[in-house]
Every structure is written in structure tokens, then in C-alpha cells.
Amino acid sequence: MNLDLTLSSLQDKGHRITKVRKEVVKIFSQSSQPLSANQVEKMLSQVNVTANKATIYRELQFLLTNRYLTEVYLHPNEVSYESSELKHHHHLVCDICGSIDNVTNCLVSKLEEDVLKKKGFQIERHMLEFYGTCSRCLKQT
Amino acid sequence: MNLDLTLSSLQDKGHRITKVRKEVVKIFSQSSQPLSANQVEKMLSQVNVTANKATIYRELQFLLTNRYLTEVYLHPNEVSYESSELKHHHHLVCDICGSIDNVTNCLVSKLEEDVLKKKGFQIERHMLEFYGTCSRCLKQT
DNA sequence: TAGACTAATGCAATAAAGTCGCAAATAACA
DNA sequence: TGTTATTTGCGACTTTATTGCATTAGTCTA
Ligand SMILES: [Mn+2]
Ligand SMILES: [Mn+2]
Ligand SMILES: [Zn+2]
Ligand SMILES: [Zn+2]
């Protein structure tokens, strides 16, 4: 099962609470959007926390490995992350403005049982992303 | 609508048939697996067609832009492509051995109408990928 | 609160994926 | 065969990400 993205949860597991880790955890626990390494770097500098790129990549990898974060692939050559605490959901990515909205309705689990029966493939997780035009961009045409 | 991934279709649209293009089209029209630029390069060299990396990237971009190929994101920092001719499907990616199988059963369209009604988001396409353990790897434990 | 221990960090080098400008090659068509 | 636009190779460059190593700094115990 996934862990809580909280400082006390990290502490309980014996992980150190450093300045960068504290801020990164805060950023993800407050964000409803998936964030890339570059976006995290920008958000860090906005709160005057400077961290080396390597440190940020290592921290994201750490939080991913320890299942505090999950990966999202929305665009080529850009990996994003979001808190594992978030309720299972999928994304509506606008091709025009790039905005990202969430869809919490997921009807994939039915298919998962089917796949195991028919193919013998044991599904652990899935990623479902939608692409199109958001309501705001639809109006502007 | 998507175009046929055939030399005559390319010719009809006024695109030139070059050695690299011919081979790349052949590779994708015969492959049931999504392929990355590196994989395409390897497959080209197997049939003694040497092509510069830049040329391969440009060709993939060309075929994508002209909708002969579609993009697939299965892993971080690796974009794969497959023929647009293939029937709409999704992938079963094995976390253990990396094998990729296809699922043609798709029940997402119902949800798409829902999303338009409730969110006003016009869905054009979606990507659904499954991760877990394939039947062969399940047996080996 | 002072050490001891280990995880985390910065820095610089390196790697991998992808892009771009430009001159040369070549496919298409007359 | 000659003309023209597209494609290609090459090399330089960009972006994203990783790694080794010396230093810094959390955490724990005495
Ligand atoms: Mn999300
Ligand atoms: Mn496929
Ligand atoms: Zn939009
Ligand atoms: Zn497998």
C-alpha cells in the first residue's frame, strides 16, 4: 500500500527530514497538478530554497522508490510526479492550452479482472490519460 | 481520420519514397509492438540500412505529423511509435520481463461522453496502459 | 550537547534523447 | 537529362537525467 506523504510518515520510516525534502513534500502535498523536475525546481526557488538539479532528481527518485510519489507520463520527454496520497484518478490534458484537470471516475477495474482471466496477466496499476480541448478553449473558437 | 501506412498512400500525398522511409514504413507495418527511435535504428541496421540518428528522428516526426504513426508513452524518457493503422488498443507491460501485449477491448468511450457532459472537455484521444506481471513471469515464481 | 554515523548535498563530469543549421545528395517530374 | 524541392549526413547544441566523490548535515546515543 502507498504511504502518506507527510513528514511524520517519513520520520517513522527512518528517513531524514532535510530542508529540500521538507519543501518538496510540502509542494506535492499541496499540489493537485502533476509536477516535473523543472517545475519543482521553480517552485522551490519561489520559496527561496535553492537545490541542485541532481539533488532534486535524487529526491524525486527517492520519493518514487519509497512510494510517496507516483509517475505520470503526459508528454514526450517529460516525466511528472504526484502524491500517492491522491485518490486514484486520470487526467484531461488540453492540447491547446496545456491545462490539466482530473477525472476521478475510473471504470477500468472491470476490465482488469477480464484481462487476468483471458490473458493470465496480473495487472498492478494502470495509467489512463485523455487528450483534447478543455471547455475554456472550446469557447474561444 | 488516420492514413494507411503504405508506400502508395505516401506517394498519393506527394511524399517521396526514400530508402530510409521505405524501410521505416515496412518496419512499422509489420510490427505489432511499439518501437522507439533506438529500436528502429537497430532494426534498420539489421537489414543493412544505415541511417543517421537525426534522419530517424526526423522520419518518425514526419510520420507522426502526417498521422501515419501514433505516439505511445510506456516508460520514462522513452517515446515509442506504432502504426496508426492498428485497431485501437492498449498495452499490457510486464514489470518483470518488459514484454508488451495488446488489449483490444476498450470500454473508455462511455466515460468520454460523460466527461464532455460534466466537464465540457472534448476528448480527442486517450492512452491507457497497464502494468503488472505477465503470465510467463507469474509462473516463474 | 558533543561526538559518531550515515544519509543527503553540491559540484562537475557524463550519458541519453532529441533538435537544428547547413551543405550535399537524391527523388520526382517535366 | 535537367530542374527543383525534399531528404540526408554531419556536427554542434539542447534538455533531461545520472553518477562519483568530497563535504555537509540530520539523527541518535552517551
Ligand atoms: Mn493528477
Ligand atoms: Mn500497441
Ligand atoms: Zn485548454
Ligand atoms: Zn513478463
Image (spheres, coloured by chain):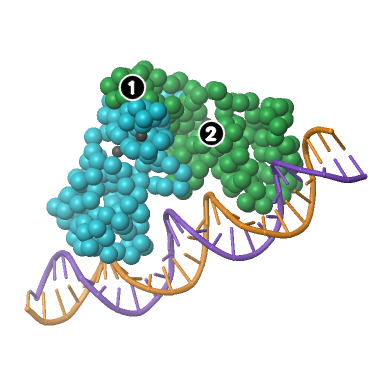
Chain colours: A cyan, B green, C orange, D purple
Q: Residue at x 20, y 52 (%)?
A: A26
Residue B113 percent across, percent down from the top left:
35, 18
Kindly identify the residue that appears in the image at 46 percent across and 39 percent down. Answer: B73
Q: Amino acid at mark 2?
A: Thr
Q: Which residue is mark 1?
A: B116
Query: Which element is circle 1 on?
Result: helix
Say which residue label 2 marks: B70
Give the camera-side residue of A69 and B20.
Answer: B20
Image quadrant for the N terminus of chain A?
top left
Q: Which quadrant holds residue A38?
A: bottom left
In depth, the one of B49 and C27 nearer the eye is C27
Say which amino acid is labelled 1. Leu
Q: Quadrant of residue B28?
A: top right
Q: Is residue C27 above or below residue B4?
A: below
Drawn side of residue A30 relative to residue B9, left or right:
left
Residue D19 in percent (x, y) is at: 43, 64
| Residue at 57% in and 25% down | B2
Q: Is residue B22 visible?
A: no
Query: From what the image shows, is residue A114 above or below residue A8?
Result: above
Q: Residues within 10 Å of mark 2 (few under 14, many from 20)?
A: some
Mark 1 C-beta closer than 8 Å to ligand 3: no
Closest to the observer, A135 or D12: A135
Dots 2, 1 in contact, CB < 8 A:
no
- State the quadrant of the C terminus of chain A: top left
Identify the chain of the residue marked 2, using the numbered disc in the image: B
Crowd class of label 1 (few under 14; some 14 to 19; many from 20; radius 10 Å): some
- State which chain disc 1 sits on: B
